[in-house]
Image (cartoon, rainbow, N blue to C red):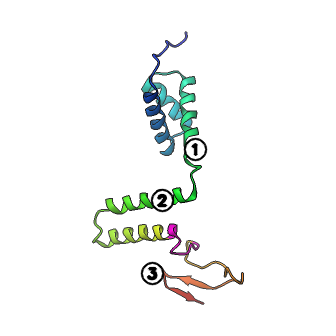
């Protein structure tokens, strides 16, 4: 038995639904879960649900085509919001979290050179030879 036709929705409502599905994709839900949620929440068929999910996915791909500068600005703003919302900045754990946020912003800006997770510097960019340099958490470098 075919599903009853649902009333046509406005463009604004469609955009709201696309945005909600976009958020679900960002939260990591599987396509199957998203389709079930769309069908249950808005009472539409699977075909329309897949179309809505595809439209959200396409929108996500368009967002990812932004320039590097736009992406860097976006990530800086995320970190600034995290810093603003951080509680207990005066306690040791809060201060460490704030410092990690500040360090990640400095890496994005190019102020702190990116290195491997253990703090070892990579090859010398000028000569290409291997360096034995350890970078301490406070930024001090030690040549070995």
CA gap, disc 1 to disc 3?
39 Å
Task: Bin the neighbour count of mark 1 within 10 Å (Cα to Cα): few under 14, some 14-19, many 20 and up.
Answer: few
Q: Nearer the viewer, residue 93 or 56?
A: 56
Which residue in the rendered view is the most extreme toward the right? 128
Which residue in the rendered view is the most extreme toward the bottom? 144
Q: Which residues are magenta?
A: 107-116
Mark toward the start of the polypeptide (1 vs 3): 1
Q: Could you tell whether 26 is left or right of 115 in the image? A: left
Res. 73 mark: 2
Local secondary structure at mark 1: helix
Quadrant location of the N terminus in the rendered image: top right
Local secondary structure at mark 2: helix
Coordinates of residue 85 in the picture (x, y in percent): 32, 59
Coordinates of residue 79 in the picture (x, y in percent): 42, 61
Quadrant location of the C terminus in the rendered image: bottom right
Residue drawn at point x = 42 percent, y = 67 percent: 101
Give the residue pinned by disc 3. 138
CA gap, disc 2 to disc 3?
25 Å
Q: How many marks?
A: 3
Give the residue pinned by disc 1. 62
Question: Is most of the magenta stretch helix, strand or loop?
Answer: loop
Mark toward the start of the polypeptide (1 vs 2): 1
Residue 27 vs 83, above or below: the answer is above
Q: Nearer the viewer, mark 1 or mark 3?
A: 1
């Amino acid at each position: 038995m075919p599903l009853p036709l649902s009333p046509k929705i406005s463009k604004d409502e469609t955009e709201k639904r696309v945005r909600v599905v976009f958020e679900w994709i960002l939260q990591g839900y599987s396509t199957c879960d998203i389709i079930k949620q769309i069908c249950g929440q808005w009472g539409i068929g699977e075909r329309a649900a897949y179309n809505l999910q595809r439209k959200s996915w396409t929108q996500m791909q368009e967002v990812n085509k932004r320039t590097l500068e736009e992406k860097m600005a976006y990530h800086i703003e995320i970190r600034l919001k995290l810093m603003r919302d951080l509680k207990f900045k005066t306690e040791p754990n809060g201060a460490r979290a704030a410092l990690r946020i500040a360090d990640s912003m400095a890496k994005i800006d190019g102020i702190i050179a990116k290195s491997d997770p253990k703090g070892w510097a990579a090859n010398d960019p000028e000569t290409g030879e291997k360096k034995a340099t350890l970078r301490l958490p406070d930024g001090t470098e030690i040549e070995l």
